[in-house]
Image (tube, rainbow, N blue to C red):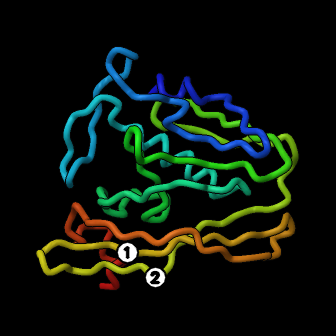
């Protein structure tokens, strides 16, 4: 993780430029110093070089949703791994990446320069987008149309819609934007603690 972070920390995204995670990080290999981590593949966790980099793409995507930067490529996770007990963000608000065909790309269509700052803390991955000018808007990301459904094959699917509200600096709402719709296979029973309320039971 620290190696990947070192390749993007401090990046300046100029007006008109597009950030690509894989273009900057490159192929994660042992020869480059990447270590093995856990990779989610076909619904199971398996060891893989560079495993865990989705934590980085998740953070960058979440931060970007709170800026005027435009997400040009983002792929949802196919599986919902953990129940809601310790979840701090809405289900489906992350972004998966797989070298080199599933990427996270963000374009700066504003007239301002943005800088990406990422740090590997003692227990958390920390980051922020910094802008050369004070932002004139605030954003609140939320979910709606949440549904858990039992499928014909015996498992469960989880669905929702992610949107964001846009406010001026006086908290006047200026807009409400659709962001994405998510569908994922649940890797846990929906009646586990933290999931009961979300099932409406």
Please say if the residues under marks 2 and 1 sit with CB atoms less than 8 Å apart.
yes
Left or right side of 93 for 150: left
Q: Quadrant of the C terminus?
A: bottom left
Residue situated in front as seen by the camera: 16 or 13: 16
Left or right side of 123 for 157: left
Label at residue 159: 1
Q: Quadrant of residue 52?
A: top left
Residue 55 in the image, given as x and y percentages of width and height: 44, 43
Residue 171 in the image, given as x and y percentages of width and height: 81, 71
Q: How many marks?
A: 2
Residue situated in front as seen by the camera: 159 or 111: 111
Residue drawn at the location 37% of the way across and 57% of the way down: 77
Residue drawn at the location 73% of the way across and 70% of the way down: 166
Residue 31 in the image, given as x and y percentages of width and height: 34, 14
Q: Quadrant of residue 70?
A: bottom right
Residue 60 in the image, given as x and y percentages of width and height: 56, 45
Q: Secondary structure at mark 1?
A: strand
Residue drawn at the location 37% of the way across and 77% of the way down: 198
Q: Secondary structure at mark 2?
A: strand
Q: Is residue 3 above or below residue 55?
A: above
Q: CA distance from mark 2 to mark 1?
A: 8 Å
Q: Earlier in the sequence, mark 2 or mark 1?
A: 2
What is the crowding at mark 1: few (fewer than 14 residues within 10 Å), some, or many (at least 20)?
some
Label at residue 145: 2
């Amino acid at each position: 993780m620290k190696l990947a972070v070192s390749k993007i920390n401090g990046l300046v995204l100029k007006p008109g430029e597009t950030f690509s995670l894989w273009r900057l990080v490159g192929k994660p290999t042992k020869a480059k110093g990447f270590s093995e981590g856990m990779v989610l593949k076909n619904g199971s966790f398996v060891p893989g070089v560079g495993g865990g980099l989705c934590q980085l793409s998740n953070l960058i995507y979440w931060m970007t949703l709170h800026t005027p930067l435009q997400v040009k490529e983002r792929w949802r996770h196919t599986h919902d791994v953990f129940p809601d007990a310790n979840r701090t963000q809405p289900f489906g608000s992350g972004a998966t990446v797989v070298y080199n065909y599933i990427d996270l790309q963000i374009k700066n269509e504003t007239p301002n320069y943005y800088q990406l700052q990422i740090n590997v803390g003692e227990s958390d991955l920390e980051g922020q987008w910094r802008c050369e000018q004070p932002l004139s808007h605030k954003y609140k990301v939320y979910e709606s149309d949440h549904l858990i459904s039992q499928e014909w094959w015996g498992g469960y699917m989880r669905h929702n819609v992610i949107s964001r509200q846009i406010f001026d600096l006086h908290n006047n709402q200026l807009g409400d934007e659709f962001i994405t719709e998510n569908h994922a296979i649940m890797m846990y029973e929906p009646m586990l603690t933290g999931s009961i309320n979300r099932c409406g039971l």
